[in-house]
Amino acid sequence: MTTVPGNAANSAGIDRFYAWTRLGISLLLATIGGVGTWAVVVVLPAVQAEFGVDRAAASMPYTATMVGFAAGNALIGRAIDRFGYWIPALAASLALGAGFLLASLANSILGVTLAQGLLIGVGCSAIFGPLIADVSHWFNRRRGVAVTVAASGNYLAGAVWPTVMPYMMQGHGWRFTYAVIGIICLVTMVPLVLLLRRRAPHEGISGAPRGRPVQPISLSPSQLQILLVIAGFGCCMAMSMPQVHIVAYCMDLGYGVAHGADMLSIMLAAGVISRIGSGFLADRIGAVKTLLIGSALQCLSLFFYIPFDGLASLYVVSLVFGLSQGGIVPCYAIIVRDYMPAKEAGQRVGIVLMATIFGMAVGGWMSGWIYDLTGSYAAAFLNGIGWNLVNLAAIALLMWRANRSAAAIA
């Protein structure tokens, strides 16, 4: 193994002050840009009322946003492998701001849908998978913590923006609110992206360290990619049931919308704690074991939703669910960085996270479909548990292959 001089590591900025500064900027960027995935949920009732469409048609902007967000994770992830992070992120930030401004001027639900999918969804994807992949290059010793902190920006956005937006909408309507958000994104995100112009160490810095060596595993990169896609899709099919339907579930039980919204907020706040905690755990025991623990706890917490449907019980179970699932998705990015070449990180992380986003989208729809068939969410929770078991099987296979490879070398 080649020893890298200390001054080379310092110049690259890995694990140094610059890396932590970059992480702070990235977290702020993600918290601002994460509005792209939450704003459409907040304005959905107002958009439906203005255009006089049914709930299915009013939900199309959200669906388009998720499709654009998923596709953007893969496309922009691939772009950062080639050009570095800041150029694709700058284009995405401009697209995000323009999308909000154009949506505020749309004269039909179709116009809002196109702006959400082609500009907002794709634009805000740069602050998720691609950002996580970029951050991972700047840390060796604390990679798990860094990745999970960067991933927490999306949840922080979900805690901040839906709280602020209703106040603007009460006085000025959803169009004004969207226009203000578009301007805020342009004014703040563009300067922040320009602060991230330094290229990642693997992209050609002379004498820069190559980071932690790729760990051995008896799977080809393509096989590992497929396994992670299956695991990611399965876990988010399960994860989507409480996150997408907890408000409706509370309404069915007679507790009202406000309690359901509070439970969702508790999930997201607990998810931030879980994400950062999982990063510390991944740095100690490895991302695969951390992923297995988080997935097993998520499966267990889904079981709790079925018998415990009292108001106080649901608050507790929602807290447990948030503490269980928050660290799952970032672990996929850490596994990619541990077992795959650094030069492919953006594309590989983007593809895996795209699978998780599709899992959320399909799982949210399927839970509603099952509810329509059965008249109850009990079967939908069982469906989520079934997909969680698929996820656990994929992770168990991954762990077995990784342990076997490590044992062979030892």
Image: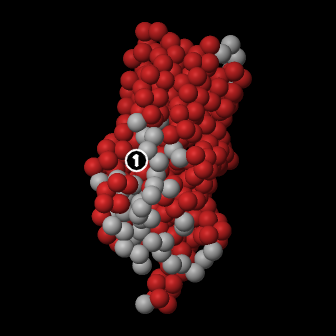
Indicate the amino acid at tag 1: Ala
- Residue 317 position, x and y percent, is 37, 52
Q: Nearer the viewer, residue 104 or 409?
A: 409
Q: Nearer the viewer, residue 278 or 267?
A: 278
Query: The residue tagged with tag 1: helix, strand or loop?
Result: helix
For disc 1, the marked residue is 150
Does residue 234 appear left or right of residue 146 in this picture? right
Q: Nearer the viewer, residue 363 or 405?
A: 405
Is 15 located above or below residue 172 in the figure? below
The quadrant in which the C terminus is found is: bottom left
Q: Residue at x 34, y 54 (%)?
A: 11
- Residue 261 position, x and y percent, is 42, 35
Q: Is residue 213 visible?
A: yes
- Residue 334 position, x and y percent, is 45, 61
To which quarter of the image does residue 287 belong? bottom left
For this orientation, the residue located farthest to the front is 206
Q: Residue at x 40, y 41 (%)?
A: 26
